Image (tube, rainbow, N blue to C red):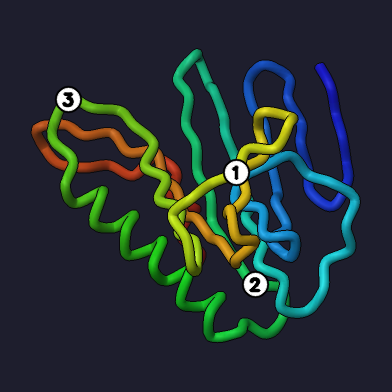
C-alpha cells in the first residue's frame, strides 16, 4: 500500500485509487504533483474502485473558480462524447468510456513515468468518464454520483 498527498491524490491499496490532475500544466492524465490550484485551472478528478474484483472508473473535469470559454467548451465536448458513447454501446458489455478532448491537436506525449499524458502542443485538455453495464434491458451507468435531495 502507498499513499501520496500532493496537489492531487493518489491512494492505492489494491481496491481503489484516486487521481486529480491539474491542467494548468496541460496534463490530460497523470500522477498528482505538488501544485497550488488557481482560479481558472482545469482539473480532472479520476476515481477507480475495484469491489469484489470488478473494476469501475469515473472521471470529471472541472474548473477552479471562473471558467474560460475554452475550458467550458472542452468539458462540454467530453460530456457530449461520453453521452454519445453510452448511447452507442451494445448488450453484454461492462466497460469504462473515457473520451479525452484537446484544444488544438490529436497528438499525445507520454512522460517518462509511463503514466502521464499531455497534449503535444501544451494546449488545454479535458476528459469525462463513466463505467457502464450494458444488458438486454438497457444501459446502467455504475459510476453516477448519488442524487441529492
> Could you give the CA–CA distance between mark 3 and mark 2, rounded to whole angstroms?
35 Å
Q: Which mark is residue 63?
A: 2
Tell which of 20 and 99 is nearer to you.
Answer: 99
Task: Return the residue at label 3.
Answer: 92
18 w.r.t. 83: above or below: above
112 w.r.t. 23: above or below: above
Q: Quadrant of residue 125?
A: bottom right
Q: Are marks 3 and 1 in contact (CB under 8 Å)?
A: no
Say which of marks 1 and 2 sits in front. Answer: 1
Q: Residue at x 32, y 38 (%)?
A: 132
Left or right: residue 95 compared with residue 48: left
Say which of marks 3 and 1 sits in front. Answer: 1
Tell which of 97 and 92 is nearer to you.
Answer: 97
Q: Earlier in the sequence, mark 3 or mark 1?
A: 3
Q: Which mark is residue 41?
A: none
Secondary structure of the residue carrying tag 1 is: strand
> Could you give the CA–CA distance between mark 3 and mark 1, rounded to whole angstroms?
34 Å
Task: Return the residue at label 1.
Answer: 109
Expressed as whole percent of the image width and height from the top left, the position of residue 118 reads 62, 50
Expressed as whole percent of the image width and height from the top left, the position of residue 92 reads 17, 25
- Pick the quarter of the image with the N terminus: top right
> Could you give the CA–CA distance between mark 1 and mark 2, rounded to whole angstroms?
23 Å
Q: Residue at x 58, y 53 (%)?
A: 120
Q: Quadrant of residue 123?
A: bottom right
Q: Residue at x 53, y 46 (%)?
A: 108
Q: Earlier in the sequence, mark 3 or mark 2?
A: 2
Amino acid at each position: 500500500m502507498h499513499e501520496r498527498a500532493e496537489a492531487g491524490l493518489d491512494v492505492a491499496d489494491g481496491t481503489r485509487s484516486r487521481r486529480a490532475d491539474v491542467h494548468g500544466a496541460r496534463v490530460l492524465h497523470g500522477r498528482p504533483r505538488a501544485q497550488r490550484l488557481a482560479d481558472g485551472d482545469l482539473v480532472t478528478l479520476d476515481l477507480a474502485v475495484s469491489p469484489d474484483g470488478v473494476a469501475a472508473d469515473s472521471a470529471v473535469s472541472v474548473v477552479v473558480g471562473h471558467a474560460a470559454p475554452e475550458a467550458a467548451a472542452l468539458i462540454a465536448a467530453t460530456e457530449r462524447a461520453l453521452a454519445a458513447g453510452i448511447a452507442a454501446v451494445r448488450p453484454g458489455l461492462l466497460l469504462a468510456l473515457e473520451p479525452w478532448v484537446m484544444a488544438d491537436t490529436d497528438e499525445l506525449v507520454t512522460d517518462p513515468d509511463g503514466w502521464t499524458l499531455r497534449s503535444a502542443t501544451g494546449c488545454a485538455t479535458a476528459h469525462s468518464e463513466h463505467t457502464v453495464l450494458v444488458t438486454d434491458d438497457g444501459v446502467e451507468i455504475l459510476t453516477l454520483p448519488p442524487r441529492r435531495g
